Image (tube, grey):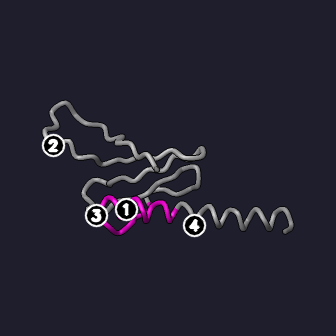
Amino acid sequence: MLEWRDKTSYSRGDKERKPRIWELKVGGLRIVIHRIIHYPEWYVSCYDLSIEDNCLYTDDLEEAKAIGIKTIIDRIEELEKAKSILIGQ
């Protein structure tokens, strides 16, 4: 099971503690599902894979996590193809 952690920085005065940043660490990757201020959708970032603020076009957190993971998997598959070309397979 994947363990997402709330990494939102809350102000002391925040009365409504609504998470805006969710982080998942897996296999050396740091995957972040997050909001951007003034935008309703969720975004995914994974700097290790050169993915930054990629809009997921949903405001539903669970759907965003699923789409975000699919985005990461797709990028890894692209890199695996590049690796195969580089090693001549």
Q: Nearer the viewer, residue 53 or 63?
A: 63
Amino acid type at mark 3: Asp
Which residue of the protein is positioned furthest toward the left in this rendering?
15
Crowding at mark 4 (Cα within 10 Å: few <14, some 14-19, many 20+): few
Which residue of the protein is positioned furthest toward the top in this rendering?
12
For the record, the magenta segment spans 54-71
Quickly name the residue at label 4: 74
Q: In the visual, does 52 lie left or right of 79?
A: left
Which residue of the protein is positioned furthest toward the right in this rendering?
88
Amino acid type at mark 4: Asp
Dot placed on the residue nearer the N-terminal end, 3 or 4 = 3
Q: Nearer the viewer, residue 2 or 44?
A: 2
Quickly name the residue at label 1: 64
Residue 82 in which image quadrant: bottom right
CA–CA distance in space, label 3 to label 1 = 7 Å
Quickly name the residue at label 3: 59
Quickly name the residue at label 2: 16
Amino acid type at mark 2: Glu
CA–CA distance in space, label 3 to label 4 = 21 Å
- Tell me, yes or no, whether the two marked residues, 3 and 1, touch with CB atoms within 8 Å: yes
CA–CA distance in space, label 2 to label 4 = 35 Å
**How far across and how far down the image is residue 14, in percent?**
17, 37
CA–CA distance in space, label 4 to label 1 = 15 Å
Residue 87 in which image quadrant: bottom right
SS label for mark 4: helix
SS label for mark 3: loop
Dot placed on the residue nearer the N-terminal end, 3 or 1 = 3
Amino acid type at mark 1: Ala
